[in-house]
């Protein structure tokens, strides 16, 4: 098993046709035996992970059975959010528990934030080189 | 036409027309560049100040860990 996963920034087209680089991370999310492949935006400023509504539905999550969360901030404040606990696998690393604010918002990207993606993995950004590195927190090594 | 040539003509406009012109140009600039405009709505999805929800999610994780260990 590799100790470090090195990932290139993804190129995206901006609103004005400009090329922008984003730290997007592919991962597998599982709930009760149902798995989906997803791509999340690494957001060091986000307090929490955010799961778009459709992704939760694809995992078979039941909106009414998930606990209601306090109102989120920014554009997400206008949408109700519920907590959902998933299992996540990044690269060849061991599966970890990832908890998400499952929002009714449809347009929001999957966001990977402090609680708890950044608690489980040490991530170093090398923006000048256009790459970032991911490794499990030390207690997982 | 250069701005210096336009200015004398623009100064002849009524105040309401000047305001209209400012708003129109502000909108155009905003559409053509990355300038932020007061009163406009911008998408900021990042939940950067969601401490209460973060505490709730952290409790879900801790409870799950306790359940698995117990």
Image (tube, helix red, strand yellow):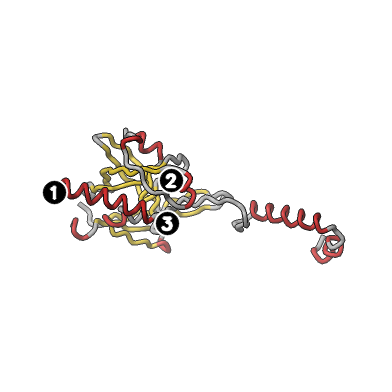
Q: Is residue B6 left or right of residue A90?
A: right
| Contact? badges 3 and 2 (CB < 8 Å) | no
Separation of residues labelled 2 and 1 (CA atoms): 33 Å
For disc 2, the chain is A
- Which image quarter holds the C terminus of chain A? bottom left
For image coordinates 23% across by 50% down, the residue present is A93
**Callout 2: 10 Å neighbours few (<14), some, many (20+)?**
some
Percent coordinates x, y for residue A140 in the rendering? 19, 56
**Callout 1: 10 Å neighbours few (<14), some, many (20+)?**
few
Q: Nearer the viewer, residue B23 or A91?
A: B23
Instruction: Please tell me whether mark 3 sits on a helix, a strand or a loop.
Output: loop
| Contact? badges 2 and 1 (CB < 8 Å) | no
| Contact? badges 3 and 1 (CB < 8 Å) | no
Decide which of tag 3 and tag 1 comes sooner along the chain: 3
**Callout 3: 10 Å neighbours few (<14), some, many (20+)?**
some
For image coordinates 86% across by 64% down, the residue present is B8
Label 2, on which residue?
A109
The correct choice, above or below, for A131 with respect to A84 in the image is below
Percent coordinates x, y for residue A33 in the rendering? 24, 34
For image coordinates 82% across by 66% down, the residue present is B4
Q: Nearer the viewer, residue B51 or A138?
A: B51
Query: Furthest residue to the left?
Result: B70
**Residue B48 numbered tag:** 3
Label 1, on which residue?
B69
The correct choice, above or below, for B18 with respect to A17 in the image is below
For disc 1, the chain is B
Q: Nearer the viewer, residue A12 or A75?
A: A75
Query: Furthest residue to the bottom?
Result: B4
For disc 3, the chain is B
**Residue B3 numbered tag:** none
């Amino acid at each position: 098993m590799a100790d470090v996963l090195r990932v290139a920034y993804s190129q995206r087209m901006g609103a004005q046709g400009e090329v922008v680089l984003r730290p997007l991370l592919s991962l597998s999310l599982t709930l009760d035996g149902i798995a989906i492949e997803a791509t999340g935006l690494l957001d060091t400023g986000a307090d929490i992970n955010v799961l778009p509504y459709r992704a939760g539905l694809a995992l078979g999550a039941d909106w009414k059975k998930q606990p209601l969360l306090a109102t989120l901030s920014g554009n997400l404040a206008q949408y109700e959010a519920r907590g959902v606990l998933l299992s996540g696998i990044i690269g060849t690393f061991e599966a970890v528990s990832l908890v998400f604010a499952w929002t009714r918002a449809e347009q929001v990207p999957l966001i990977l934030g402090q609680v708890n993606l950044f608690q489980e993995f040490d991530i170093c950004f090398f923006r000048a080189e256009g790459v970032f590195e991911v490794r499990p927190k030390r207690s997982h090594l | 036409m250069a701005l210096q040539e336009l200015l004398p003509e623009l100064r002849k406009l009524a105040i309401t027309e000047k305001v209209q012109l400012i708003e129109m140009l502000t909108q155009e600039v905003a559409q053509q560049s990355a300038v932020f405009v007061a009163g406009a709505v911008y998408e900021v999805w990042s939940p950067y100040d969601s401490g209460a929800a973060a505490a709730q999610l952290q409790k879900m994780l801790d409870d799950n860990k306790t359940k698995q260990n117990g």
